Image (cartoon, rainbow, N blue to C red):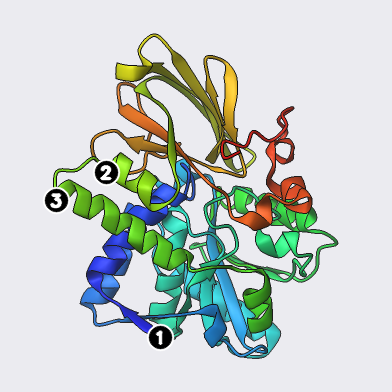
């Protein structure tokens, strides 16, 4: 079931994946410009389903690692992520059959397209998060107990590294994060390779297609003068938990992450009420009147109240009129093992998970 993606579908994917990024993964705009350039140069992109993979197929899992705010200042070309895949293939002694995103959220949703254009590989319609998460152990592959090594890392200065072994996923996160911080808090990576069987068993399927459909919902609703926020909620089981104006955003880049807190004052139906959000690259907890109303692993999305487009943790600014929407998490993360990896306590927060979908 191979599908060739056209320019409009790539544009829609960028909009939809920015929404699924839950504030993180990096603003996709710069990577979208890169992919537009590849399309203009004659590259095409083939999207395949996980079921199309042979069980022993080799799948490269790619991403940019680092703090989203740094991505706005230190631009990446398309060759770095392709080079990370090449390094991994050399280390393994075999070529890859396909490439996929570790997270279908923000700019990382477009990294497989950069690699595919250079390496002539199909892109798997799946990822390991169904959104964006900040750390390497926060994936469905980690929940499944799959092997966390090796990992290849590339810095545009010409610094290249392979981590050949790590005892746990958290140690792989610590080691690769330290390397990333040392080269400037941004690097292209090829994560531990996956077999076709592992992608079918533990990947989250159809997330590229979902991103395209959400982007199309935003585009069509605006063209038809309908409310894009309402349309998005209808399209992906979302519900509005607050609407208002950003009045303060406190940000700090620490340990290779963008951390902080955002404050909102309510407008319209929410007038007289307040909201706040904790974030570590992504929005992790939403509070209304100082009470937690939604937490990871569910998707907390900050949307521009008029355009319906996502607002990221690095782009949120004073005065923006925004609506907070929560969408349900992939089921793999709501299990006890999943919550150990991506629940609030995995972020160092002394909170039990708040499920807004009882």
Residue 159 placed where, x, y %? 58, 65
- Residue 311 lies, in percent from the top left, at 37, 38
The crowding category of the residue bearing disc 3, from other C-alpha atoms within 10 Å (few below 14, some 14 to 19, many at least 20), is few
- SS for callout 2: helix
Q: Are marks 2 and 3 in contact (CB under 8 Å)?
A: no
Q: Quadrant of residue 69?
A: top left
Q: Secondary structure at mark 1?
A: loop
Distance (Cα) linking label 2 and label 3: 10 Å
Rendering coords of residue 28 (x, y %):
37, 54
Marks 2 and 1 sit apart, C-alpha to C-alpha, by 30 Å
Q: Position of residue 168 (x, y in %)?
A: 82, 59
Q: Report the residue marked by disc 1.
A: 2
- Residue beneath disc 2: 228
**Cβ–Cβ under 8 Å for marks 3 and 1:** no
Secondary structure under tag 3 reads helix
Q: Say which residue appears at 57% left-offset and 15% top-offset.
A: 290
The residue at 36%/31% (across/down) is 323
Which part of the image, by quadrant, shows the N terminus? Answer: bottom left
Looking at this view, is 245 or 85 the one in front?
A: 245
Q: Are marks 2 and 1 in contact (CB under 8 Å)?
A: no
Sooner in the amino-acid sequence: mark 2 or mark 3: 3
Label 3 sits on residue: 223
Q: In this rendering, would 229 be left or right of 69?
A: left
Horizontal side, residue 3 vs residue 250: left or right: left
| Other-residue count near label 2 (Cα within 10 Å), few / some / many at <14 / 14–19 / ≥20 | many
| Camera-side residue of 217 and 314 | 217
User: Which tag is nearer the camera, tag 2 or tag 1?
Assistant: 2
**Structural crowding at the residue carrying mark 1, measured as other residues with C-alpha within 10 Å and reported as few (<14), some (14–19) or many (≥20):** some
Q: Total label count?
A: 3
Residue beneath the point at 37% across and 55% down: 16
Rendering quarter of residue 111: bottom left
- Give the quarter of the figure containing the C terminus: top right
């Amino acid at each position: 079931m191979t599908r060739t993606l056209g320019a409009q579908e790539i544009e829609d994917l960028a909009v939809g994946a920015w929404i699924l990024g839950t504030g993180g993964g990096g603003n996709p705009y710069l990577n979208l410009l890169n992919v537009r350039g590849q399309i203009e140069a004659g590259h095409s992109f083939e999207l395949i389903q996980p079921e199309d993979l042979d069980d022993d197929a080799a799948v490269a899992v790619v991403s940019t690692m680092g703090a989203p705010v740094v991505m706005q200042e230190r631009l990446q070309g398309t060759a770095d992520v392709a080079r990370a895949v090449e390094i991994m293939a050399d280390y393994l002694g075999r070529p890859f059959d396909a490439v996929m995103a570790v997270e279908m959220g923000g700019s990382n949703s477009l990294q497989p397209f950069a690699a595919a254009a250079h390496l002539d590989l199909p892109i798997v319609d799946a990822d390991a998060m169904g959104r964006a998460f900040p750390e390497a152990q926060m994936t469905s592959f980690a929940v499944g107990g799959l092997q966390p090594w090796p990992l290849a890392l590339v810095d545009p200065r010409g610094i290249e590294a392979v981590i050949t072994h790590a005892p746990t996923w958290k140690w792989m996160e610590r080691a690769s994060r330290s390397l990333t911080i040392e080269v400037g808090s941004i690097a292209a990576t090829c994560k531990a390779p996956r077999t076709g069987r592992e992608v079918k068993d533990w990947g989250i399927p159809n997330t590229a297609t979902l991103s395209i459909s959400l982007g199309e919902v935003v585009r069509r609703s605006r063209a038809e003068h309908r409310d894009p926020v309402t349309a998005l909620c209808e399209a992906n089981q979302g519900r509005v938990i607050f609407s208002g104006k950003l009045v303060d955003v406190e940000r700090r880049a620490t340990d290779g992450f963008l951390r902080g807190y955002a404050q909102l004052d309510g407008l319209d139906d929410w007038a007289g009420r307040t909201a706040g959000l904790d974030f570590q690259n992504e929005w992790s907890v939403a509070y209304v009147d100082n009470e937690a109303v939604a937490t990871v692993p569910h998707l907390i999305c900050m949307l521009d109240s008029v355009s319906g487009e996502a607002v990221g943790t690095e782009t949120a600014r004073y005065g923006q009129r925004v609506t907070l929407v929560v969408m349900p998490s992939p089921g793999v993360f709501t299990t006890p093992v999943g919550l150990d990896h991506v629940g609030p306590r995995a972020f160092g927060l002394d909170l039990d998970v708040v499920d807004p979908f009882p």
